[in-house]
């Protein structure tokens, strides 16, 4: 995985607020990238909606058994 470093000089009195805001922005960015990858994969899928629902149900059942949810 690539690592990106960004240096930002922030006045000490704003450091906490800046860090909190930056964390939120990065979380949103990562979430959007993950969903765009999923969308790309799904756009090439040849599964029917019924097959997807069946696989989803089976995956949920396995997760419940494995993690005791």
Image: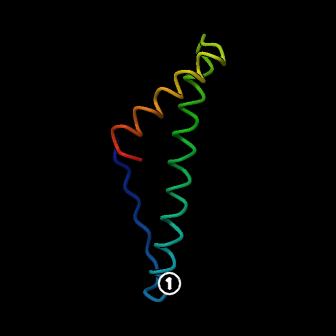
Location of residue 35 in the rendering, given as x and y in whole percent from the top left corner: 57, 38
Q: Which residue is mark 1?
A: 14
Left or right: 33 in relation to 3? right
Q: Nearer the viewer, residue 1 or 51?
A: 51
Location of residue 20 in the rendering, given as x and y in whole percent from the top left corner: 49, 72
Location of residue 69 in the rendering, given as x and y in whole percent from the top left corner: 42, 47
Q: Residue at x 46, y 72 (%)?
A: 19
Mark 1 crowd level (few <14, some 14–19, many ≥20, 10 Å Cα): few
Please tell me whether residue 33 is drawn above or below residue 54 in the rendered image: below
Q: Nearer the viewer, residue 9 or 33?
A: 33
Left or right: 2 in relation to 20? left
Q: What colour scheme does the image use? A: rainbow
Q: Residue furthest bottom?
A: 13
Quadrant hosting residue 63: top left
Q: Secondary structure at mark 1?
A: helix
Please tell me whether residue 2 is drawn above or below residue 6 in the rendered image: above
Location of residue 53 in the rendering, given as x and y in whole percent from the top left corner: 60, 24
Quadrant of the drawing holding the N terminus: top left
Q: Residue furthest top?
A: 46
Q: Residue at x 44, y 69 (%)?
A: 8
Q: Residue at x 51, y 39 (%)?
A: 34
Q: Residue furthest right?
A: 49
Please tell me whether residue 57 is drawn above or below residue 66 in the rendered image: above
Q: Residue at x 51, y 79 (%)?
A: 17
Q: Nearer the viewer, residue 15 or 35?
A: 35
């Amino acid at each position: 995985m690539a690592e990106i470093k960004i240096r930002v000089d922030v006045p000490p009195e704003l450091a906490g607020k800046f860090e909190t805001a930056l964390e939120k922005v990065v979380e949103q960015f990562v979430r959007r990238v993950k969903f765009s990858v999923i969308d790309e994969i799904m756009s090439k899928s040849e599964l029917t909606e019924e097959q997807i629902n069946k696989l989803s149900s089976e995956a949920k059942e396995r997760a419940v058994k494995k993690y005791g949810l």
